[in-house]
Amino acid sequence: MDIKKIIGKIHLWLGIASGLVVFVLGLTGCIYAFEEEIKALVYRGKLEVFAHGHIKPLFLSKNLQAAQEKLRDDLPISGIIVKNTPESSLIFKHYKGKEDTEGIWFWDGIASNLSVYVNPYTSEIIHVEDTTFEFFNMVLWLHWSLLLKNDIGQPIVGVATLVFIIMLITGLVLWWPKNRAAKRQRVWFRWKRTTKWKRKNYDLHNILGFYSMFFALVVALTGLVWAFDWFNSSVQWMVNGGETIEREKEEITSMKAPVASDNPLDLAHSYLRSNHKQAKQYYFFLPQDSLSTITSVIAYEDITRNVSLKFDRYSGELLYTNGKWEDKSNGEKVRAYNYDIHTGAIGGLVGKTIAFFLSLFAASLPVTGFLIWYGRTFKKLGKRPKPRKGPVVLRKPA
């Protein structure tokens, strides 16, 4: 058996072992590529409000109070999403995990996960959502860990992604033409009216696989950054020039002081609107104990401008600024870009479109590969000589 046949066997059995997981990852990645755009259309009723041109939004603390009153006291709001457009509703988030971690599914570790959509001009409650089973959240968890808990699903996804990378490499070896005549058939479709579906399926698997290999490798490698800590550390070590950079976490706490005349949350919100006017949206993480701070993450279209701030929970005073792009190491910068590279968002709408079709093709690879194997296997079986019917006549020896 020559080396190419051995590689073919490896390619086949790895494909059978990982095919279902790769199909799921490709299909969910395809859906999630345009998650933001689809949500804007499908969830328009709860994401958009009528912007009163002459009326200013109510204080954020006032809308927080309305959202908290809608929930029970034992369901405290822990986060707020403020989109920096006048037509956007406010989203107040509550999340509570379970101490009892029995079960294998991701929802087995969630006690409650709610989102409250509020009109910022009137404090009207637009919608209360159980976010655990929201469609795009389910798609995300299916892509992230196959709906399993992280410690179960993530290793499976990670190993399947590693296998997918090996399959891309072995697939290139199998694709590589022996001569110029074979090359013509490997680089483009040469279909005729008489071309059978088996040939078309073979070409879809091989030709599209060749042209998409580089992009598929990028998507797979960026996925491994989340799947394995060792891979994430290795990537950062490599781009840092063979150096491991560890940063000490600075503990920032609130200083108990006389309560300010204005609500600290409103002061923090006002600071962001004054100093980060061009931001896409603000995230607030509310303090969970007496020493915690009000933490805010400012998100821009250009991620190099993203920054995290900490405010005193009692006075609203700015205590700490973290995440400035110029302060990051090369490894941290690459890590910051990882999500946008993986989803295609780094290329805007064009990048997302490429990611969409790439994910769709990745999902098709196990299907077209299986059909190739099925056709070859049963074609060979069909060529076996059929047993003769009737009695067998034995000749006498001469």
Image (cartoon, grey):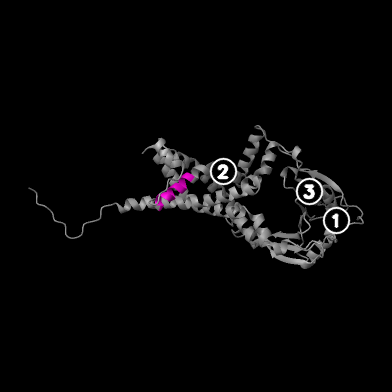
Q: Earlier in the sequence, mark 3 or mark 2?
A: 2
Residue 26 in the image: state x and y as whole percent: 55, 52
Q: Nearer the viewer, mark 3 or mark 2?
A: 3
| Res 96 visible | yes
Residue, disc 1: 266
Between marks 3 and 2, how big is the CA–CA gap? 32 Å
From where the camera sits, is residue 101 visible? no
**What is the span of residues highlighted in magenta in the rendered image?**
197-207
Neighbour class for label 3 at 10 Å: few (<14), some, many (≥20)?
A: some
Q: Give the residue number, with chain letter if any, for mark 2.
A: 215
Q: Are marks 2 and 1 in contact (CB under 8 Å)?
A: no
Judged from the image, the secondary structure of the residue bearing numbered disc 1 is helix
- In terms of image quadrants, where is residue 115? bottom right
- CA gap, disc 1 to disc 3? 19 Å
Give the mark nearer the N terminus: 1 vs 3: 1
As shown in the figure, which amino acid type bears the numbered disc 1? Asp
